[in-house]
Image: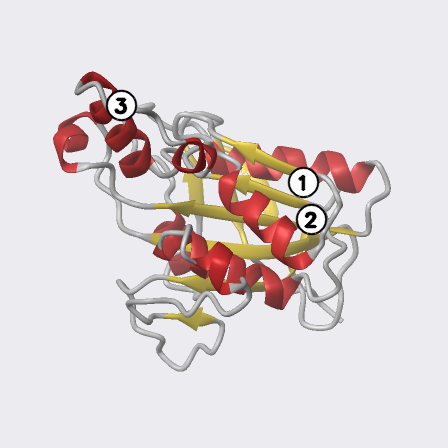
Amino acid sequence: MTDLYLQDWRAWTPHRKTAGECRLDTREKPAGAAVPSMLRRRLNLLGRAVCDMLATLDSGADSIVLHASRHGDGERTLEMLYGLNDGEPLSPARFGLSVHNATVGVYSIASGNRRSQQAVAASGGEWAALMAEARGYLADGQPSVIIVFSDQPVPRRFAAYAPESSSAAVVLRLGGDPNPGARRLLETSVELELETATLQPLDIIDWLMDSRRVVACPLSRRSWQLPAVRP
């Protein structure tokens, strides 16, 4: 199995304290400075945070980007569906930004990144799906890939049908070789009950900040640790 190494990361959530961690942004409203104002107005707060973090980790605008989100921008999608039910016309611009790859699409336009970009939804197995996709690209000879894991609470009307979640996003650069300061993503198989809470971006942020030693995905029955790489 191809080894995975965490080379760098950034995260955003207003639901944690930085605890001296400069890679975590806890502002309520991300700036979205990486995106021109005409495009920025189309993004929600989560999208602005993701674009800013991608601009930092993909400074050359030449990285493959993999983005996973369980629900995407559900609020925008539901607003359009309710509008259609009321006989209102469908806005092509709003529809274009409601699709699952909208955020990385806006980032691609703003940055000029023409590399492969992929959007994933896996019914609670998003983190495991990202790991599998990243291994595939690295096994094919890519030196590194950037993965994005983001989500936000579902609209209130549907809160009873989805796991409780908080607005958060995390962006990681993964490679097949360790760079100075890298940490290995040690993946193992585990037996988990399917009722176990699914992984969310906030869980990954806690893990990156060493508040959790292990994260595990019940759907894939896999777990991950981050041991330091020995020199």
Tell me which label, 2 or 1, sits earlier in the chain. 2
Q: Secondary structure at mark 3?
A: helix
Q: Residue at x 58, y 59 (%)?
A: 54
Residue 196 visible in rendering:
yes
Q: Residue furthest right?
A: 141
* Depth check, front residue: 230 or 158: 158
Amino acid type, callout 3: Leu
Q: Secondary structure at mark 1?
A: helix
Q: Position of residue 134 (x, y in %)?
A: 67, 40
Q: Splitting the image into 4 quarters, where does residue 226 fall? A: bottom right
Amino acid type, callout 2: Leu
How many numbered discs sit on the rendered protein? 3
Quarter holding the N terminus?
A: top right
Residue for badge 1: 134
Q: Is residue 64 left or right of residue 69?
A: right
Residue for badge 3: 81
CA neighbours of label 3 inside 10 A, class few (<14), some (14 to 19), many (20+): few
Q: Splitting the image into 4 quarters, where does residue 90 fall? A: top left
Which label was assigned to residue 166? none
Q: Is residue 46 left or right of residue 23?
A: left
CA neighbours of label 1 inside 10 A, class few (<14), some (14 to 19), many (20+): many
Q: Nearer the viewer, mark 2 or mark 1?
A: 1
Q: Is residue 198 left or right of residue 63?
A: left
CA neighbours of label 2 inside 10 A, class few (<14), some (14 to 19), many (20+): many
Tell me which label, 1 or 3, sits earlier in the chain. 3
Q: Nearer the viewer, mark 1 or mark 3?
A: 3
Q: Are marks 2 and 1 in contact (CB under 8 Å)?
A: yes
Residue for badge 2: 4
